Image (cartoon, rainbow, N blue to C red):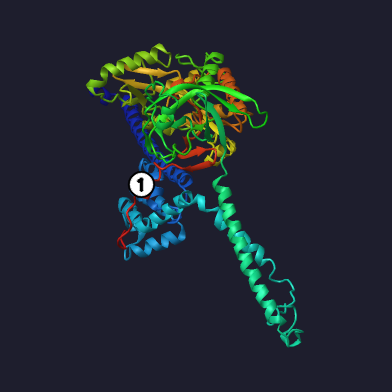
Amino acid sequence: MARANEDPQLARILEAMVEQMRLHHEEMKSLLAALASSQKPAVQDVSIDQYDQLSKDVQKFVPDDETGNTFDYCFKRYGPLIRDSTLPDGKKRDSVLMKLDEEAYRKYADDILPLHPHEVEFETTVTNLQKLFASKKTLIRRRYECLRIVYPLLTSSHVPFPLKMDSTDMEQCQDIHAVQKKKVKCYNCGGPHYRSTCPLLSSNTGQEMRQKKSRRKRSHRREKNQCKNVVIFAVENARTYLDVKIGGRFLHFLFDTGTDITLISRRTWKRFGSPTLEPCATPVKTADGSPMKIDGRFATDFSVKDRITGEMIQGKGLCYVTESTKIRVEKYHCRMVAQGESQRAEVIADLEKQFAEVFKCELERCTKTKAKLMLKDNATAVFKKKRPVPYASVPDLDEEIDRLVAEGVISPVDHSEWAAPIVVVMKKNGKIRLCADFSTGLNDALQLHQHPLPTAEDVFTKLNGGQLFTQIDFAEAYVQVEVDEESKEMLTINTPRGLFRYNRLPFGVKSAPGMFQQIMDAMICGLEGVAAYLDDVIVTGRTDAEHRQNLEALFRRIQEYGFHVRMEKCNFLMPQIRYLGCIIDKDGRHPDPEKIKVIRQMPVPKNVQE
C-alpha cells in the first residue's frame, strides 16, 4: 500500500478497478430486479390460464327441479375440477358465480342480502347454493312419479279396452257436422209420419200393431240373450282336445303348449295299473308360481291320431303324477306339450355333438378382434397400493391367481406406472371372484367407447312372435376378449402377491361394455330371432323348426368368433324367461313380480308428510 502511494499511476489503476467493480455490481442488481419483475406476470398468466380453462370446461348452471338439475348434482360433476385447481379461493368463488344463469344469480344475490356475492368465501358460497337450489320435490311427489312409471306395466292387460272405447268415440264424433234430416215417428202406429195424419187414428188397428211390435221387441230381447249365452259357451270351449291312447286305454286330453311336462292324476295312474314311479327332483310350479307336489313320474308309450292325415303318431315320454287340485287334473287327465324334456335333451345333445369346441371347459378367446383402450389427452398414470385381504381368503385368492395365470388371463410383472387395487368377492358356490377396482384412477383417464347399448324396445322387437326361448350364457364373457399390447400396462392390478397385468378385457373397465356390445352386434348381425344385450343372448322362433334353425345359426357364429359357452347356465326351449327385468313368453312381456314387489307392498300414505 505504501508502494501504491509512492506510485501515482498505480493508484489511479486501482481506483479505476474499484469503480469498474462497483458498476458491475450495480448492473447485476438491476438484472436481478428485472428478472424478478418478469417472473410475476408468468405466475399471473398461469392463474389466468386456469381461470379461462375452468370457464371453458364448466357448463352453465340452469336450475330445473323437474329434470333433477340441482346445484348439488352439478357441483358433484364439476366441483373436483374447481377444488383441485391452484386458484385462490376468491377466483374459485368467482368461477362458480360466473356459471350461474341470470335468474339463479339474481335469486342468490337476494337470498344473501345484505352481503354481496363476492364478499362471501368460496366454501360458504357452495353451501349456500346447495341449500338454495336443492330439490323441492316432496316424498309424495316422488312416489307419484315412481307410480306413474310403474302403473302402465301393472295395468297393461286393461289397455285395449279404453283404447277401443276411444276409437269408438272418435268414429262417432266424425258425424257431428253431417247434415241429417230429422226423423218423424208416429206415436200411434210407429210409422214415419205425424200422428195427426195417421190413417189408423180412428180405428183399432193401431193398438193391435203396437201390441205386435211390443211382442217382437220381447222376442228380440230373448234372442239376444240366447246369442250371448252361445258366445260365452263358445269361448269356454275354445280349447284343443286330443284322444290319446296310453296303456291300451283312450283318454280325453287337453292339449296345452304352455307347459313343460305331462301331468295325470293319481286316480288315472291307478287305472294304468299303478306303474312304478321314480322320484322327481325337478321343482314344479303352477302358472301363478305356487309350488305343486309331484308324487313321481314314469315312462310310457302313447299314440295320437293326426287330425289332418288320420294316421296314428307313436311316441314315448314321461308322465308326472300329482294329487294337486290347482290345475284340475281330474277333469283334464293330461296336458300334452309340443316341447318337453325329451325334445330339450335332444336339442342339447345335437348342439354338443355339432359344436363341441363351443362347450369346452377351457377358457377360449375371441379370434376376430382385440380390445384397445384409449386415454384422454391430459391423462396421467395412477398407481394405487394393494388393499388388505381377509386372512381366511388368502388361500382361495392364491388359488384363483394361479388359475388365472395358468389360463393366460393375467401375467406377473415387476414394475408398472399403472396399478389398481383388487377386491375379493365371495360367490354363491363358495368360491371367490377377483375383481379389480379401476375406479381408483384408470376409468377417469379413459375415453368412453361410444358404441351404444341396445334399449329394451330394440331387444324385445327382435323377439316378437317367438313361442319358446333359449338363453345363452357366455363363460366369463369379457375375459374371452384379448387386449392389445399398449393397453396391458393400464390393466395392472396390485395384489398381496405383487403386480399382475391383464392380458384379457376385465370387468370393471369403463370402456368394456361398449366394446363387448360392439362385438356381439357384429356376431349376430343378419341372424333372425336372435337378440343380445351384452353377454346375455336370447334365441327364439315362430315355430320349433325355425327355433332350431336360428339356434344352429347362432352357434355357428359363436364357433366362428372363438367364444366359449357355459352349458350349465344355458336354458333351452323355455316357455318363459326372465330378461331385462321382465318376464317374456309367447304372449309378450310382463313385469317381473320380484321387481314390483316393493311397490305392491308400499304402505298407503297416512299424512301429508308421507
Residue under the image location 39 percent in, 20 percent down: 276
Up/down of 256 relative to 415, above or below: below
Q: In the drawing, does residue 121 fall left or right of residue 558?
A: left
The answer to whether residue 170 is seen in the rendering is: yes
On the image, which quarter does residue 176 sit in? bottom right
Q: In the drawing, does residue 432 fall left or right of residue 329?
A: left
Residue under the image location 34 percent in, 30 percent down: 21
Could you tell me residue 338's position as x and y percent?
Answer: 55, 29
Task: Give the secondary structure at mark 1.
Answer: helix
Could you tell me residue 532's position as x and y percent?
Answer: 53, 31
The answer to whether residue 138 is seen in the rendering is: no
Q: Nearer the viewer, residue 143 or 19?
A: 143
Could you tell me residue 547's position as x and y percent?
Answer: 59, 28
Q: Quadrant of the C terminus?
A: bottom left
Q: In the drawing, does residue 22 fall left or right of residue 103?
A: left
Q: Nearer the viewer, residue 223 or 531?
A: 223
Circle 1 residue: 598
Could you tell me residue 349's position as x and y percent?
Answer: 52, 17
Q: Amino acid at mark 1?
A: Val
Residue under the image location 70 percent in, 81 percent down: 206
On the image, which quarter does residue 33 sit in? top left
Q: Nearer the viewer, residue 335 or 6?
A: 335
